[in-house]
Amino acid sequence: MVARAYTVAFEGVEARLVEVQCAVTAGLPSFSIVGLPDKAVSEARDRVRAALTAMSLALPSKRVTVNLSPADLPKEGSHFDLPIALALLAALDVVPREEAEGSVALGEMSLDGSLVPVLGALPAAMAAAEAERALICPAKCGPEAAWVGATQVIAPGSLAELVRHFSGQSPLAPAEPGEATGDPAARDLRDVKGQERAKRALEIAAAGRHHMLMVGPPGSGKSMLAARLPGILPPLTPIEALETSMIHSLSGLIDEGGISRSRPFREPHHTASMAAIVGGGRGAKPGEISLAHNGVLFMDELPEFPRNVLETLRQPIETGEVVVSRANAHMRYPCRFMLAAAANPCKCGHMSDPSRACARVPQCGADYLGRISGPLLDRFDLRIDVPPVAFTDLDLPPSGDDSATVAARVARARDLQTARFEHSGARTNADLEGQLLDDIATPDTEGRALLTRVAERFGLTARGYHRVLRVARTIADLEGADTVAQPHVAEAVSFRLNLSNA
């Protein structure tokens, strides 16, 4: 008679249910695993055999066959150890079959039977909740999985503890969610001297999730400004926190089951490969753009990134998701992020200072920023010139609002957008498109006339035209205005035309 247990196989952030079937039949003693297992899954038989021996349980002198169904779905990872052991124990009548069949299990086993934490406990708990089953996972994964309150999470420390739980000798209490991690100490905007226009752009970008590009000489404060973005962004909503944490769970970035409500801020180095930025490698793992989902991806020294890496950002920026295709994997990851980028105006960085500029000015500036293609540049809603700060300004007292004040204005603008888009697929003004964009962001008569003149004079693309409307809508939201007026359009246009006429 076949005994069954259940586990999951990961396809991107989705966890697909896998049925683990175990049959103990007459024949030459053997232990085989079928169903398209990878090397780690095939080696589970040795770990399971050793773990059972550590519990003073010996396999019978029969043929043990384990099938992972569906058989055409690739099975990867060491988390198949526990469900295979559970199905085998059910086949040997060591644990009740209905208990094994009524749960989803995942976990790696040591040779002594203790359970080792694995990646993906959170999406596995989501799959267990959808299947209306309990989840069994290692003790260290329990606090993470318990954040999904729709399913019961049992987190034993070893296989022996799980057997005693099922037999009623020593029942385990359901796991409790881990502690919500505290927000890191945010850096204050008032630390930045001068750069009031750049601070204003930062506020607009945070309020509407608009992509922004800062260009200025070395030391002008571009990286300093970007580092203050987390301090003015609103916390993640419960839905956003779950989406982001599922990706981080697959990447092993959740520490001791703690889920953070602060938005991710990722800043990859310009030597990062395409697989590191977009996703890929062995198993088509999520890249930086997915790890920045619902947060910020900061790319300092943007022209220094390889051209092919920059060009792969174009589609994810528009669609909010990326499909990583490899010969043996085809994964889809969400990546709705805000792109903040910084660049020097030229290779030497001093194009605006004749006393320090190189001999190739102004051609070196055109060549350097020319590494950023027109189509990618067109996707930046805000383009800001960040001039150098005079030494005399550094001694002045802090100016402008602090991060808490700006964050309050950003939160009010985001609340307006949340209420406005309650019954649509959009979340922020950056997501506006089609009829929804026309209904919400169409300016008044004076604003429309101004935008028409700008589009004709500077040759705005259709994408650029729509992005100006989205930014203007965000500026109106920051003021609490119901209608997009001419001043809102004028300010949005001023940020659009800073670096080029597109």
Image (cartoon, helix red, strand yellow):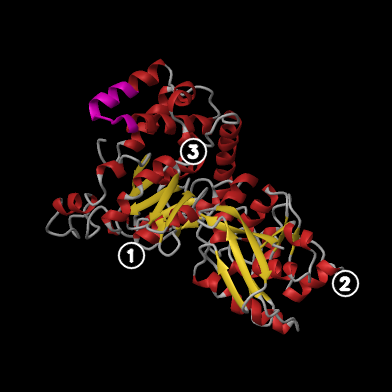
Residue 441 locus on image (x, y percent)? 46, 25
Identity of the residue furthest to the left in this view? 359
Residue 120 locus on image (x, y percent)? 59, 60
Which residue in the structure is indicated by mark 1? 271
Which residue in the structure is indicated by mark 2? 169
Above/below status of 246 relative to 255: above
SS assignment at label 3: helix
274 falls in the magenta region: no
Q: Which residue is at 34% across, 24% downward?
A: 451
- Does 196 sit left or right of 405 as displayed? left
* Dominant secondary-structure state across the stretch colored magenta: helix
Which residue in the structure is indicated by mark 3? 208
- Does 415 sit left or right of 4 as displayed? left
Dot 1 amino acid type:
Thr
Dot 2 amino acid type:
Gln
Quadrant containing the N terminus is bottom right
Q: Quadrant of residue 63?
A: bottom right
Specify which label sits upstream in the sequence, 3 or 1. 3
Q: Is label 2 or label 3 in front?
A: 2
Pick whichever, 68 or 30, lies toward us: 30
For label 1, count other residues whose C-alpha is less than 10 Å away and answer few (under 14), some (14-19) or many (20+): few
What's the CA distance linking mark 1 and mark 2?
A: 56 Å
Above/below status of 98 relative to 84: above
For label 2, count other residues whose C-alpha is less than 10 Å away and answer few (under 14), some (14-19) or many (20+): few
Q: Please report contact status of discs 3 and 1: CB closer than 8 Å, yes or no.
A: no
SS assignment at label 1: loop
Residue range corresponding to the magenta coloring = 451-463
Dot 3 amino acid type:
Gly
Q: Is label 3 or label 1 in front?
A: 1
What's the CA distance linking mark 2 and mark 3?
A: 56 Å
